[in-house]
Image: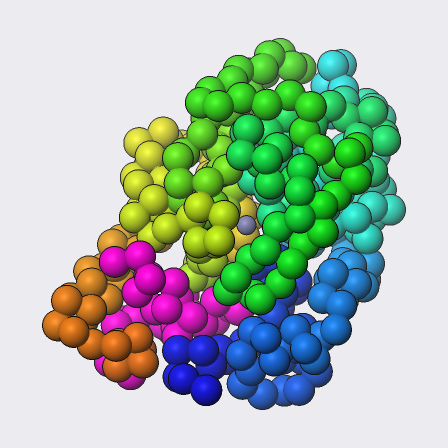
């Protein structure tokens, strides 16, 4: 087994991006993704089992916007007379706790769901939210990925095609603006970044900006090359996010501490740029992936950013592939 395929993983919740952690929990050791999945047998059930237990934490922001934390990616909810708008759907097993938390915000029915991208930990709940009455809005590539089975190579995992009720019904290619609950929801495609389907959601009246998985707050991000992501696109997306917000904006990351700001976003961009430079230099010197990992190009950042499931070695591998 090459060093580049050994991932040390810790377990602080489940998501598609963290899914291999389940294998680690069972064996308590270093595993390749395929070994982890062989151990995990049915990763989707494990993720659902975990989501079935984790409590949902509510963060009330402003302008009738709140965050629900604890079911895959960070979910934002806008309440009001036009009905609730969800930004991301979390994992289906959390349904009763998400509903309880959402009912605690207001009694408005759920009318709209926006997917920031196609990944399971952001779109698994699409079907039940649609059954509640939500129209599903997403980028056309999210629609494309949710229509058919998907494979994420880095996790050696095949996701089956979801039921039709989980497939977005309103799609766009570049930008789309909704006006609901006296708020503007400006949706914008990033281009290739974490996947090829990522969008940001800007709510200017509340000055709140949801970055989806182009921003992981305080933790190394996953980059899904299997469905169109790459490190250059992640850096471009971080730059676009910085250009879109001010020091007063509340910035919502896809993962990590859910209430963030421009300063933290800026530190994230700086981390991506520095590691990109370090890995590119080593690769240009002719170092193999294993030699690059041994050279520890992330060392200056590991204490802060390397404490989640995307370990320094795995993040180095994700960057190495794209430079
Ligand atoms: Zn994702």
Residue 33 lies, in percent from the top left, at 56, 74
Q: Residue furthest left?
A: 285
The reply, left or right, for residue 243 in relation to residue 21 is left
User: Where, quadrant-wise, is the C terminus in this rendering?
Assistant: bottom left
Residue 229 lies, in percent from the top left, at 42, 48
Query: Could you tell me what secondary structure mostly forms the magenta stretch?
Result: helix
Number of numbered discs on residues: 0
Q: Nearer the viewer, residue 88 or 314?
A: 314
Is residue 295 in the magenta section? yes
Instruction: State which quadrant residue 115 falls in.
Output: top right
Q: Nearer the viewer, residue 219 or 4?
A: 4
Residue 187 seen in the figure: yes
Q: Is residue 148 above or below residue 323?
A: above
Residue 63 seen in the figure: no
Q: Nearer the viewer, residue 249 or 76?
A: 76
Q: Is residue 300 above or below residue 56?
A: below
Residue at 54 percent of width and 29 percent of height: 139
Residue at 26 percent of width and 72 percent of height: 297
Residue 190 lies, in percent from the top left, at 41, 34
Q: Residue furthest front?
A: 148
Residue 169 lies, in percent from the top left, at 69, 23
The reply, left or right, for residue 38 in relation to residue 276 is right
Q: Is residue 108 above or below residue 194?
A: above
Residue at 42 percent of width and 61 percent of height: 220
The reply, left or right, for residue 280 in relation to residue 179 is left
Residue at 26 percent of width and 62 percent of height: 275
Question: Where does the magenta region start and end?
Answer: 294-323
Instruction: State which quadrant residue 277 falls in.
Output: bottom left
Is residue 152 in the magenta section? no
């Amino acid at each position: 087994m090459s060093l580049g395929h050994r991932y040390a993983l810790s377990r602080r919740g489940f998501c598609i991006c963290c899914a291999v952690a389940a294998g680690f929990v069972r064996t308590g050791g270093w595993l390749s993704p395929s070994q982890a999945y062989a151990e995990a047998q049915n990763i989707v059930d494990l993720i659902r089992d975990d989501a079935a237990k984790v409590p949902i934490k509510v963060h009330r922001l402003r302008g009738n916007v709140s965050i629900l934390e604890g079911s895959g990616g960070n979910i934002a909810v806008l309440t009001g007379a036009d009905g609730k708008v969800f930004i991301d759907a979390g994992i289906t097993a959390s349904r009763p706790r998400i509903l309880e938390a959402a009912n605690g915000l207001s009694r408005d029915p759920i009318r709209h769901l926006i997917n920031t991208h196609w990944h399971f930990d952001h779109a698994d709940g699409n079907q039940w939210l649609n059954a509640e009455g939500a129209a599903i809005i997403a980028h056309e590539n999210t629609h494309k990925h949710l229509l058919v089975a998907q494979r994420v190579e880095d996790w050696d995992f095949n996701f089956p095609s979801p039921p039709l009720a989980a497939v977005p019904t309103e799609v766009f290619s570049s930008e789309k603006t909704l006006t609901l609950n006296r708020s503007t929801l400006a949706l914008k495609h990033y281009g290739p970044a974490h996947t090829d389907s990522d969008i940001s959601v800007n709510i200017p009246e509340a000055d709140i900006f949801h970055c989806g998985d182009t921003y992981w707050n305080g933790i190394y991000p996953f980059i899904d090359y299997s469905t169109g992501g790459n490190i250059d696109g992640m850096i471009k997306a971080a730059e676009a996010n910085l250009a879109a917000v001010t020091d007063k904006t509340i910035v919502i990351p896809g993962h990590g501490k859910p209430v963030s700001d421009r300063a933290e976003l800026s530190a994230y961009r700086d981390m991506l740029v520095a590691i990109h430079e370090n890995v590119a230099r080593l690769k240009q010197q002719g170092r193999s992936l294993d030699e690059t990992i041994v050279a520890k190009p992330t060392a200056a950042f590991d204490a802060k950013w390397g404490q989640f499931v995307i370990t320094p070695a795995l993040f180095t591998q994700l960057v190495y592939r794209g430079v």
